[in-house]
Amino acid sequence: MSTAGATVGSRLADIVGPQHVITDPARLAAFAVDNEKPSAAVSPQSSAEIVEVVKFAAKDQLAIVATGARTKLGIGLPPRQYDIALDMTRLDRVVAYDPGDLTLSVEAGIPLRKLGGILAEHRQFLPLGVPYLSQTTIGGTIASGVDSPLRQMYGTARDYLLGMEFVTGEGVAAKSGGRVVKNVTGYDIHKLMIGALGTLGIITRINFKTFPTPSASRAFVATFQTVERACGMRNRVAQSPLAPMTMELFSPGVAGLFAGKAAAQIEPNSMPENVISGTRWTFTMGFSGNENTLKRYETDLHKMAEECGAVDLVVLSGSQIAAAFARKREFVPIALSSSPAATILKMSVLPMRMAEALATAARAAEANRLPWVAMARGVGVIYFAVLPTERNEEAKQQAAHASNQILAACAALGGQASIPWCPTEWKSALKVWGLERADFVQMQKLKNVFDPRGVLSPGRFAGGI
Amino acid sequence: MDPRVVSELKKLLGAEAVLHRPEELLLYEYDGSVEIARPNCVAFPRTTSDVVGIVQIANRYQVPVVGRGAGTGLSGGALARQGGILVPFSRMNRILEVDAENQRATVQPGVVNADVSVAVAHLGLHFAPDPSSQRASTIGGNVSENSGGPHTLAYGVTTNHVLSLEVVLPTGEVVRLGSPALDSPGYDLPGLFVGSEGTLALVTEVTVKLTRLPEAVKTLLAIFDTVDDATETVVDITARGITPAACEMLDGWTIRAVEAYVHAGFPVDCAAVLLLEVDGLRQAVEQHAEDVADVCRLHHAREVRVARDEHERALLWKGRKNAFGAVGRLSPTYYVQDGVIPRTKLPDTLRRINEIGTKYGFEIGNIFHAGDGNLHPIILFDAREEEQFRRAVVTADEIIGFCIEMGGSITGEHGVGMEKDRLMPLLFSEDELNLMRRVRDAFNPAGLLNPGKIFPTTKGCGEIHVRPLPVAGASRA
């Protein structure tokens, strides 16, 4: 154990008790962020203890990274400094759940899976079908800003998050919003915390709107010869009265990925056979409702798919949906585990420009001899994964070239892109946060308000914030 | 104020775009609230660069700048509390772009809310947030206040429909926040600026989402003989996980006021009605309407009427949306509150409001977004009588205190403005208020932009009304 680790560890032990502090380097490896290990990990049980830890860190110029299940710590740039891992998993209580009001308040460290169980008892749920679902905490899910196929119908966390409690970089415990479903009291600071990687505050408590579980659902799957035709199907649905719960397009390579060993490890229920095509583009759409509504969807979708030139189509129900949905949800971890140097871009474009964006990205990857797969959400968000077979200098250069072309293409299509996932040692060569933005200065102003001394995850965010 | 401000503004905008004579300013000392504050002058920009010029003049002479839409706000947000330049956006009222395929529109802030929906109706689209003031209120005002409306129960409030903003910061910088595509990497700046009540920037352009019009709509009027039955119905509808597109309640007192004015067809002899709407696919709407009607009957609805055609439906909504106008005929002044409570507490809260009214000698009408738990108790009084005014404020504060006790909020959609700033400490600690002040100061360091709003003001800070201190249930509980 290093001397610095011992000193920091003993100060932390004073705050939370020695049994909740780790200073053993072997055990600290689990808390590494981009290969950087902290000197200590601390597991507080209350916001008050977090305040003490942050105040201590601020005074001694130490840097903190808050962690949950540690599944998404690779997102963002490497921390400029990293001394203390703040393990949030002991803050795992449901603070309040009012099923009659469809509102919920939970501590940040509660596992999403556990929470799902509690809500299911009341036939309710949170529309967070996010990657790493079986491990992830609610705090990590919100702080990392990952999304869910269900955003097609329910929007993203910003649409159903009612309020939040957090601790700033100066050790101030504060809240914004509230617990009621409508509220305009004060600034919506909690929206800033979504996807901020803990650079503005350590989220301690989150209040949500919950949703009734839909009665019955089905999934419609159709395959198309070209990306243009698959996107045409998406556009056809978007211009109809149908209200999908989920809507995704998959590139031909995804079939192999979903049938592979990595996918089976992440999601043991096997993918229904012959659903996703290995040679064509696949369109999938989930929908729900009563018997008549389901029939209406099936009829309309069959007609639309035929008009759009579908090669074949199938309707899934029951456990088939669960298995297919799980793969869609876990697209990122499945892609990451399928290549030694998986590099995943998140592209956002206007929905009608998706075919163009996908074609351009495919050309960029192929011109650089990189295998690739893509999942595109109906709302205009694309996960484009390049999957080099080697993790070496050549692959890095190829990935850098391809991703630069894709970033520029997205900007030209009225959108933007970033690279949330790539090998750590490639981060200096890749534009992890995308092209520089006009509002960067405004973001810096906020960082200066919430964390003037740079205690919280310094350097990990856009522009090195 | 330095007289050169007016001459410089005239040079910038032309003489016809600047008002400064006392009789011209009269109209601008009001908005939809009970507050009054007179600006020193009024300047009408036509372009973003006009706005930049106005802000630069304000900076040079260190005078406040306050943005204004249609002035329908209910919390004094668009009043120049500390004087200075009032900037109505009524001449920046163009719809700049409609992108039907991507369901986006880019508009100037002075565009009237309903005009956006009218302009895109032929494309089968609309702008979903529908404040009751939507025939007058502007998108810029909606953005500043994060306005709601009856259909926000299912569709969400303004912030859920705003993708990108062009703003002018108090320094005169023009900045674009967010993007027409989703998930801009970086902090959610539009999320912070929407609902910031004009204290962070002046909004000069807004890109909004357009929502597809539903294929089918059914509007139901459920009629009840007791208020309790109506509120219990709302509790039950919510608990069953039925989300109507709208779920509005009007009590008997309000219905009688509305009927005398609008003739919407509300029964004048009942204790309360629920105005419910379900929409979506034809097949789903039939069943949803049945489900909703069943719950109403279970809670002793005397009658559940379904609007037979578009005309009947429009009439019912006209009654709802003109309710405040109807109430305005009954009394020289009315005071509308905007508290929010958990939906499960509706029956208790309505009973309590009634008791509080009796205690202070006011009859209080209730017309509100029941499905959201967003209350709008209306207190009628005569503002010319100082004692009545004070009593009305004490009554309102006690109602708001009860909402907070129930775990609720002091404002659901009207904003804090200069009306509820003194109530903020009931919800937020000094640390929390300071943090929000620092957010404001980061963008608005000199405090020239809409000063005296949201945050509790200390004495001698240019306050216009000296109000009695709140009598808050929360602090006595």
Image: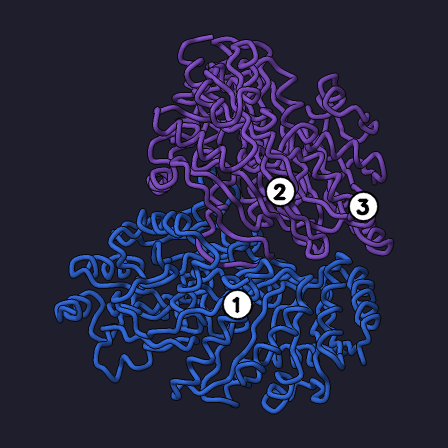
The quarter in which the N terminus of chain B is drawn is bottom left
Image point 83% across, 34% down: which residue? A320
Three-letter code for the amino acid on which mark 3 is drawn? Ser
Which sits earlier in the primary sequence, circle 2 or circle 3?
Answer: 2
Image point 64% across, 24% down: which residue? A333
The quarter in which the C terminus of chain B is drawn is bottom right
Residue at which label 3 appears: A217
Residues at discs 1 and 3 both on one chain: no
Question: What's the colour of chain B in the image?
Answer: blue
**Which chain did the renderer colour purple?**
A
Q: Chain of mark 3?
A: A
Q: Secondary structure at mark 1?
A: helix
Image point 14% across, 70% down: which residue? B7
From the image, state whether disc 1 or disc 3 is nearer to you.
1
Vertically, is B65 above or below B162?
below
Residue A397 location, x and y as percent?
46, 14
Q: Say which of A127 and A405 sits in front.
A: A127
Does residue A249 show up?
A: yes
Residue A401 location, x and y as percent?
46, 20
Residue at which label 1 appears: B400
Hey, which quadrant is residue A260 in on the image?
A: top right
- Marks 1 and 3, Cα distance to the nearest angstrom? 42 Å
Residue at which label 2 appears: A106
Q: Say which of A171 and A359 sits in front.
A: A171
Crowdedness near tag 3: few (<14), some (14–19) or many (≥20) residues, C-alpha within 10 Å: some
On the picture, is B55 further left or further right than B241?
left
Q: Chain of mark 1?
A: B
Residues at discs 2 and 3 both on one chain: yes
